[in-house]
Image (cartoon, rainbow, N blue to C red):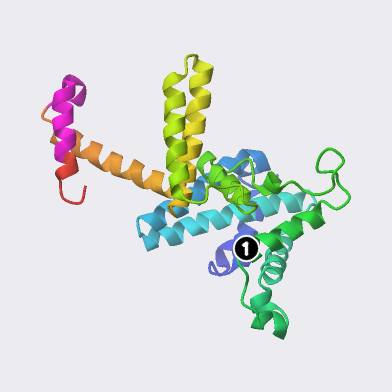
Amino acid sequence: MINDQNPRELTTLLAIMKALRDPVDGCPWDVKQTFKSITPYTIEEAYEVVDAIERDDMDELCDELGDLLLQVVFHAQMADEQDLFGFDDVVQAICTKMIRRHPHVFGSAEERAETPKKGFWEDIKAGEKTGEKAGQKAGKGDDKPLLLDSVPATLPALSRANKLQSKAARVGFDWPDVDGVYAKLDEEIGELKRAKTDDQIGEELGDLMFTVVNLSRHLGHDPEQVLRMANSKFQVRFNHMEKSAKVSLDEMDMNELEQLWQAAKAAPAL
């Protein structure tokens, strides 16, 4: 019985997921799920891990890491049912990859004695992609994979923009210093102001946001993280406004709302 198995053992979690997916005695919701249907949950759990870390809630982090691990086990169980791969194959793949990508730790005596060169991780990953695409055409008859092909299209937009820019910068396609980015930012703001149609406005807004990501990168900040911090700060301050108001916020005029906002900004730790 699963109830009698040690809940600290990974084999117990694997057994639980297998039982949940049993077509006869399993959970109807779990049984009907597919790789695509649980993808949103996988993404959500990853973000909840990040949220727990940013709030420095280690008890919740432990819980959220378990939820994220469950997603890995869920995908592996569905793959096993289709004879694609199993959980052991997932573990083997990541172990092999980590050893291959860390020759300065797991390699020969000579490799361990060398100081890793800047960009070595990306170079190893690029070599892996080349091997994966051997014999496949990457475009226009060229077998060589394109530089930006390795950036997943499913990444959040800010993270993907940051990755794309970082990849391009590796071959020298980048501003030499942050002054160039500030100038580009001014240029994009001007182009947005001059935009007339809705399509033009949307395009220029995208260019402006892309440049802001570039500015974040040049200043050494992750755009996703700084935007999450800004979101959190706005929510805290807006909550302070709502709690301080003597009437509903929608009954107040803009001047009154601005006064509440300024009071929230001046409040300790806000």
Closer to the camera in the image, 68 or 50: 50
Q: Amino acid at mark 1?
A: Gly
Horizontal and vertical percent for residue 121?
A: 64, 64
Which residues are the magenta region? Answer: 247-263
Closer to the camera in the image, 230 or 62: 230
Q: Is residue 243 visible?
A: no
Q: At 63% across and 56% down in the image, what residue appears?
A: 73
Q: Is residue 129 visible?
A: yes
Q: At 55% across and 42% down in the image, what residue appears?
A: 161
- Tell me, yes or no, whether the highlighted magenta stretch contains residue 14: no
- Give the answer, above or below, for where 206 lies relative to 270: above
For the residue carrying disc 1, how many other residues have a C-alpha within 10 Å: few (<14), some (14-19), or many (20+)?
few
Horizontal and vertical percent for residue 203?
A: 53, 25
- Give the answer, above or below, for where 257 lies relative to 153: above
Q: Residue furthest top?
A: 197
Please give left or right for residue 181 compared with residue 92 in the image. Answer: left
Report the predominant secondary structure element of the magenta stretch: helix
The residue under label 1 is 119
Horizontal and vertical percent for residue 37?
A: 62, 38
Please give left or right for residue 19 compared with residue 7 in the image. Answer: right
Q: At 47% across and 35% down in the image, what residue appears?
A: 209
Horizontal and vertical percent for residue 224?
A: 46, 46
Please give left or right for residue 210 compared with residue 190 in the image. Answer: right
- Tell me, yes or no, whether the highlighted magenta stretch contains residue 252: yes
- What kind of element bears circle 1? loop
Check the picture and name the quadrant holding the N terminus: bottom right
